[in-house]
């Protein structure tokens, strides 16, 4: 009976913390960095900008890169971007939770169905930057990568 006094809190405390995190992340929707807005994952083909993934110029030296993640690919999976341009990344998922990371940059997003993730990056150095899914999303997880060619 004495052990029960230790075992119960050791279960209850992590459970309570997990519940608190889930409520904070999904209930209030304000504690996930980069999450800005919602979108119906079933309507992506009809919903701008996700109906037309890829790079579009929105001002001189300023682009938007729209990414749609799905099991197990990114659209697009290869992009050419001018060096020194501001790139606003807007991403969502068609199905399950994915990630979008560009190592060596500040870009590190959770890509959640129903949510719009945003961040901004500028590639100062020309070169090839690989991006990948960094949230385990099933048997094809390792296939989810692509590249940005900065020129
Ligand atoms: Cu998508 Cu891992």
Image: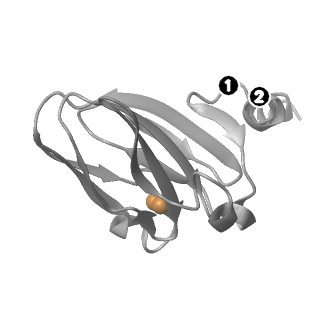
Image point 57% across, 39% down: which residue? 117
Q: Report whether the residue tagged 1 is closer than 8 Å to ligand 1.
A: no
Foreground pick, 46 / 94: 46
Residue 90 image offset from top left, x and y in percent = 51, 42
Q: Look at the image and tell me in which quarter the C terminus lies.
A: top left
Foreground pick, 132 / 67: 67
Residue 13 lies in quadrant: top right
Residue 50 image offset from top left, x and y in percent = 58, 56
The residue carrying pointer 2 sits among few (fewer than 14), some (14 to 19) or many (20 or more) residues within 10 Å by Cα, namely some
- For this orientation, the residue located farthest to the front is 60
Look at the picture and state if 68 lies above or below 6. Answer: below
**Residue 93 in view here:** yes
Residue 68 image offset from top left, x and y in percent = 51, 58
Residue 31: give its label: 1
* Residue 110 relative to residue 130: left or right: right
Identify the secondary structure beneath mark 2: helix
Residue 86 lies in quadrant: top left
Q: Earlier in the sequence, mark 2 or mark 1?
A: 2
Image point 75% across, 56% down: which residue? 40
Query: For mark 2, what is the residue?
Result: 24
Task: Report the Cα–Cα distance between label 2 and label 1.
Answer: 6 Å
Question: Contact, CB < 8 Å: mark 2 with mark 1?
Answer: yes
* Residue 9 relative to residue 58: left or right: right
Image point 30% across, 50% down: which residue? 131
* Residue 17 relative to residue 140: left or right: right
């Amino acid at each position: 009976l004495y052990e029960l006094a230790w075992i119960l809190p050791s279960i209850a405390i992590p459970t309570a913390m997990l519940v608190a995190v889930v409520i904070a992340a999904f209930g209030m929707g304000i504690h996930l960095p980069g999450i800005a807005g919602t979108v119906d994952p079933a309507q992506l083909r009809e919903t701008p900008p996700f109906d037309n993934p890829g790079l579009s110029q929105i001002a001189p030296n300023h682009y938007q890169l729209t990414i749609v993640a799905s099991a197990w690919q990114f659209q697009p999976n290869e992009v050419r971007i001018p060096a020194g341009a501001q790139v606003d990344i807007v991403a969502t998922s068609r199905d399950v939770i994915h990630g979008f990371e560009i190592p060596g940059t500040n870009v590190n997003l959770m890509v959640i169905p129903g949510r719009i993730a945003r961040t901004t990056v500028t590639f100062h150095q020309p070169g090839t930057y690989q991006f990948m899914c960094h949230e385990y999303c099933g048997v094809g997880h390792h296939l989810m990568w692509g590249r940005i060619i900065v020129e």
